[in-house]
Amino acid sequence: MFITLVPLLFLLYQTFFTPEYAGHAAVLTLKNYGDVFTDPATYLVLKNSTQFAFGSSVLALFVGGAMAWVTERTRTPGRQWMYLVNMVPLILPGILQTMAWIFLLSPKIGLLNLLATKALFLDKPPFNVYSMGGMIWIQGIHWAPFAFITLAGTFRAMNPDLEEAATVSGANLWHSLRLVTLPINLPAILSLFLILLVRGLENFVVPAVVGIPAGIDVFTSRIYEAVAKSYPANLGLASTYSIVLMIITGIGLGLYYLATREGSSFATITGKGYRARLIDVGKWRYATIAIYVFYVLIAILLPLIMLLWVSVTPYSMAISGKNLHLITFRNYVEVFNYPGVANAMFNTIYLSLLASLIITLLGIMTSFIVVKMKLRGGRILDVLGTMPLTFPGTVVGVALATLYLRLPVAIYGTVWILLIAFVTRFLPYGVRAANTSLLQVHAELEEAAAISGASLVRTLVMITLPVILSGMVGTFIYIVTLIIREFPSVVLLYGPQSRVIAVQLFEMWESAVFNQAAALGVLLILFLSVLALLMRRFQAKES
Amino acid sequence: MMAVSFAALAAAAPAGVEQVANYKGKDRDQVLIEGAKKEGVLSVYSAMNAVDSKPLVDGFTKKYPFIKVDLFAGRGEDVVARLMTEQKGRKFTADTFDAPTINVEKLRREGLLVPYYTPAQDIYNKKHIDANKYWVPIYHNILTFVYNTNEIKDAPPKTWQDLLDPRWKGKLTVEDTDEVWVINFYKAWGEAKAKDYFTRLGKQDLKIVHGHSVMQQMLIAGEVASSPTQYLHQAIADKKKGAPLNYVIMDPMVVGPEGMALLKNAPHPHAALLYIEYATSKEGQALIYGRGRNAAYPGMDPLLKDADLLIDDPTLSLDNFEYWQKLYKDLLVVPNRRR
């Protein structure tokens, strides 16, 4: 509760004040609200933000969801590798991903454009990344793997009986999908959509790097302007814009609760034992494999190859035969020459693992109280646990810094304040994931345990936990990746001994050593791949 | 009783720092070294990135092995935000701060800095150092004309007026937060000439980009052809690596000096002053120059020998920031909006 309320109250408080600076005290005012709501640009910016967030969320959901369904509900060969392959893009910081896509889709130098115009004899490059479409593509494709991992976990745990019943009644594949699969998994889908929407609304990198040259302004540009480009920094105005964002996502959250009111009708994991029966795709196998290949190529391999290329070249250049002789591994060597990089790596690894563990456990606990125990305050707890989703990262950082500088607890500038920031920021992901998992576990299982005399805790540990474990392992890993990438909340809180990789990477980027930043990105991917492989081992043993 | 004497101590601290800072006695070196030995630690907050700072810090530690340096490096705006949050929360860790002077000025206005004496002030060009002794530059952030040699095959511009020529239409890129560039031309040329120039420049089909780093990658890759507002030292560094870039030493060039300042509540003022002296000395400056920066020491950077530098006065920018932001947007950004 504390974790959620602090940033929220801080934010609200700020909206009512003018900036405090150089001898001018902060003055109580409604001017910030006036500025925001009477500025006609606000509504244009709102429209752009919504379009961007909505479009990219739909794209991610559709692509990731389709992949998840093919992976978990069909017998398409090669499914086992999809999890691992999908982890990869998640760990890449937005700036690296975005630059990779610019080098692929720029009308002037984009590799795909060059290839397409040559191969298809076009007179104009077909792709223009500097457009709303380009922005939606980059964001959508970046988050499709996240949608995949979330929905794959849901589909995996789903009882196939319902789908079987539909098939037996004569429904074909599409009917079964539309009338059974989709409605049953509505909480998971909506929950995911909400998260994607929020990430789209608060995204700063894509609108800055691609939107500005395209002339498209979004909300986050306004927030950035108010904080970083104004003197004095107008925290009150920035907070007001943030509140508007939060209201939008709050509406989304409300709709989610409306749609998921009927708890038990979503439960598909019942007392009956079952083995997930997979659809034998038969001759459609080639189609599904083709879908796989296409997806992996476009969403995952392309930006990765571009990044790899950048990491082995001394400066940005086109991928071409005549440039091959310039390949060097210098950038990787340079990465390790950075003062403090070892410390940053160490901090990042253990902080992300620890924070993710805490979040997963807290998520399970909170969700258990809410879903299973149906306490009166349960709903409120759920809302509180999810609310930090709506807090922009910078706000979390500022709020925590200000608070802990005033409290007599000496954790400012240490790893502990970073831990709190990460838990604050990503707790909602744990809560939502645990929620959807738990909703699937039918009360029958637990009632059976209770009848046999098991206490609440025992039930949780021996029955519920193992059942939702496969879903939560995926959650654990992707929260780790989100934490590793996280920058805005960290920038005000890290100290000389508590640096993390995201900061290192950002600094490299700002010093215009893009190629070294790319090398660091590749190293992060390697780390994550190893982690994912280990967890996969662990998961295989458990089942 | 204890509470009273602590309070007295706290109030006395700033005065102590100011005294040390302006001490000019014959035994100044000795006083500073003795004091630094007792302090043993130095906390540097810097906008110069850690890699470029390393030789300087290493050189300093070699000279004064009894001082352990804690370097906190980041982007200028981030370090300033950090410093302000800490100092307002009464967490006084920082000793020295260096960043583009616009950020130094922000701190000065909050009463967080103290003027000081350092020998460099007797040697450096008077126009390059702060008259009120709040900062001394350690290097210059210079904005100049940089271009991709594959995209621009004809002769590069010789003067700023050349850029108004039709052949530059559609070939120029500006960064969307370079108000400092425009402000200083207004100051140098006067309002009439500057307004005319920038209005006409704004009609040259400019491409607008966010971030000098992004712009640098685009220049190197050929995504954009040239920019009148890119950092000289970055162009030099990337050209050295073999990138198809070249730069022009224009007349004049706008400079955001990297000013080094002393914090009023510095917990280690003796060590701080030794560091400031070292960073602005010939030895320290050579190390900064060695990292490719445009070092401020007179004569050290041959490129700047006869250059006409417009040193940014942060007071101008900060006093009317909203005005300049709007002007920049209206003249350069809005006419080139695509949507």
Image (cartoon, coloured by chain):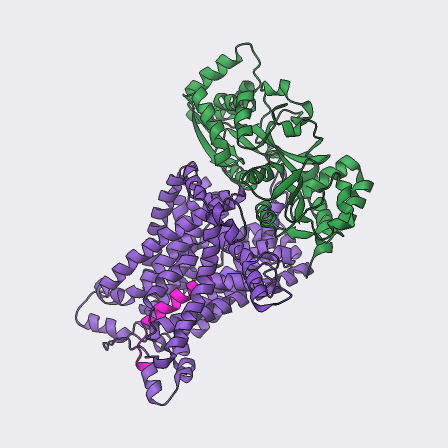
Chain colours: A purple, B green
B39 w.r.t. B314: above or below: above
Q: Of all residues shown, which one is farthest toward the left? A: A452
Q: Quadrant of residue A191?
A: bottom left
Q: Quadrant of residue A370?
A: bottom left
- Residues A473 and B90: in front is A473
On the image, the x and y values in percent for residue A334 come to 44, 39
Q: Locate residue A435, reporting x and y percent.
A: 36, 66
Q: Which residues are magenta?
A: A143-162
Please state, as top left, top right, bottom left or bottom right, where the C terminus of chain A lies in the image: bottom left
Q: Is residue A293 visible?
A: yes
Q: In the shown orientation, is residue A99 left or right of residue B327? A: left
Membership of A160 in magenta stretch = yes
Q: Is residue A250 magenta?
A: no
Q: In the current view of this chain or complex, which residue is farthest to the top?
A: B26
Q: Which x, y percent locates residue B114?
A: 58, 26
Depth order, front residue of A500/B217: B217
Magenta portion: prevailing SS class: helix
Any part of residue A1 in sight? no
Q: Give me the residue at 82% from left, 41% from top.
A: B192
**At 40% across and 60% down in the image, what residue appears?**
A429
Q: Is residue B163 above or below residue A301?
A: above
In the depicted structure, whether residue A341 falls above or below residue B168: above
Image location of residue A331, percent across then percent down: 45, 43
Residue at (40, 40) in percent of width and height: A336
Q: Camera-side residue: A231 or A370?
A: A231
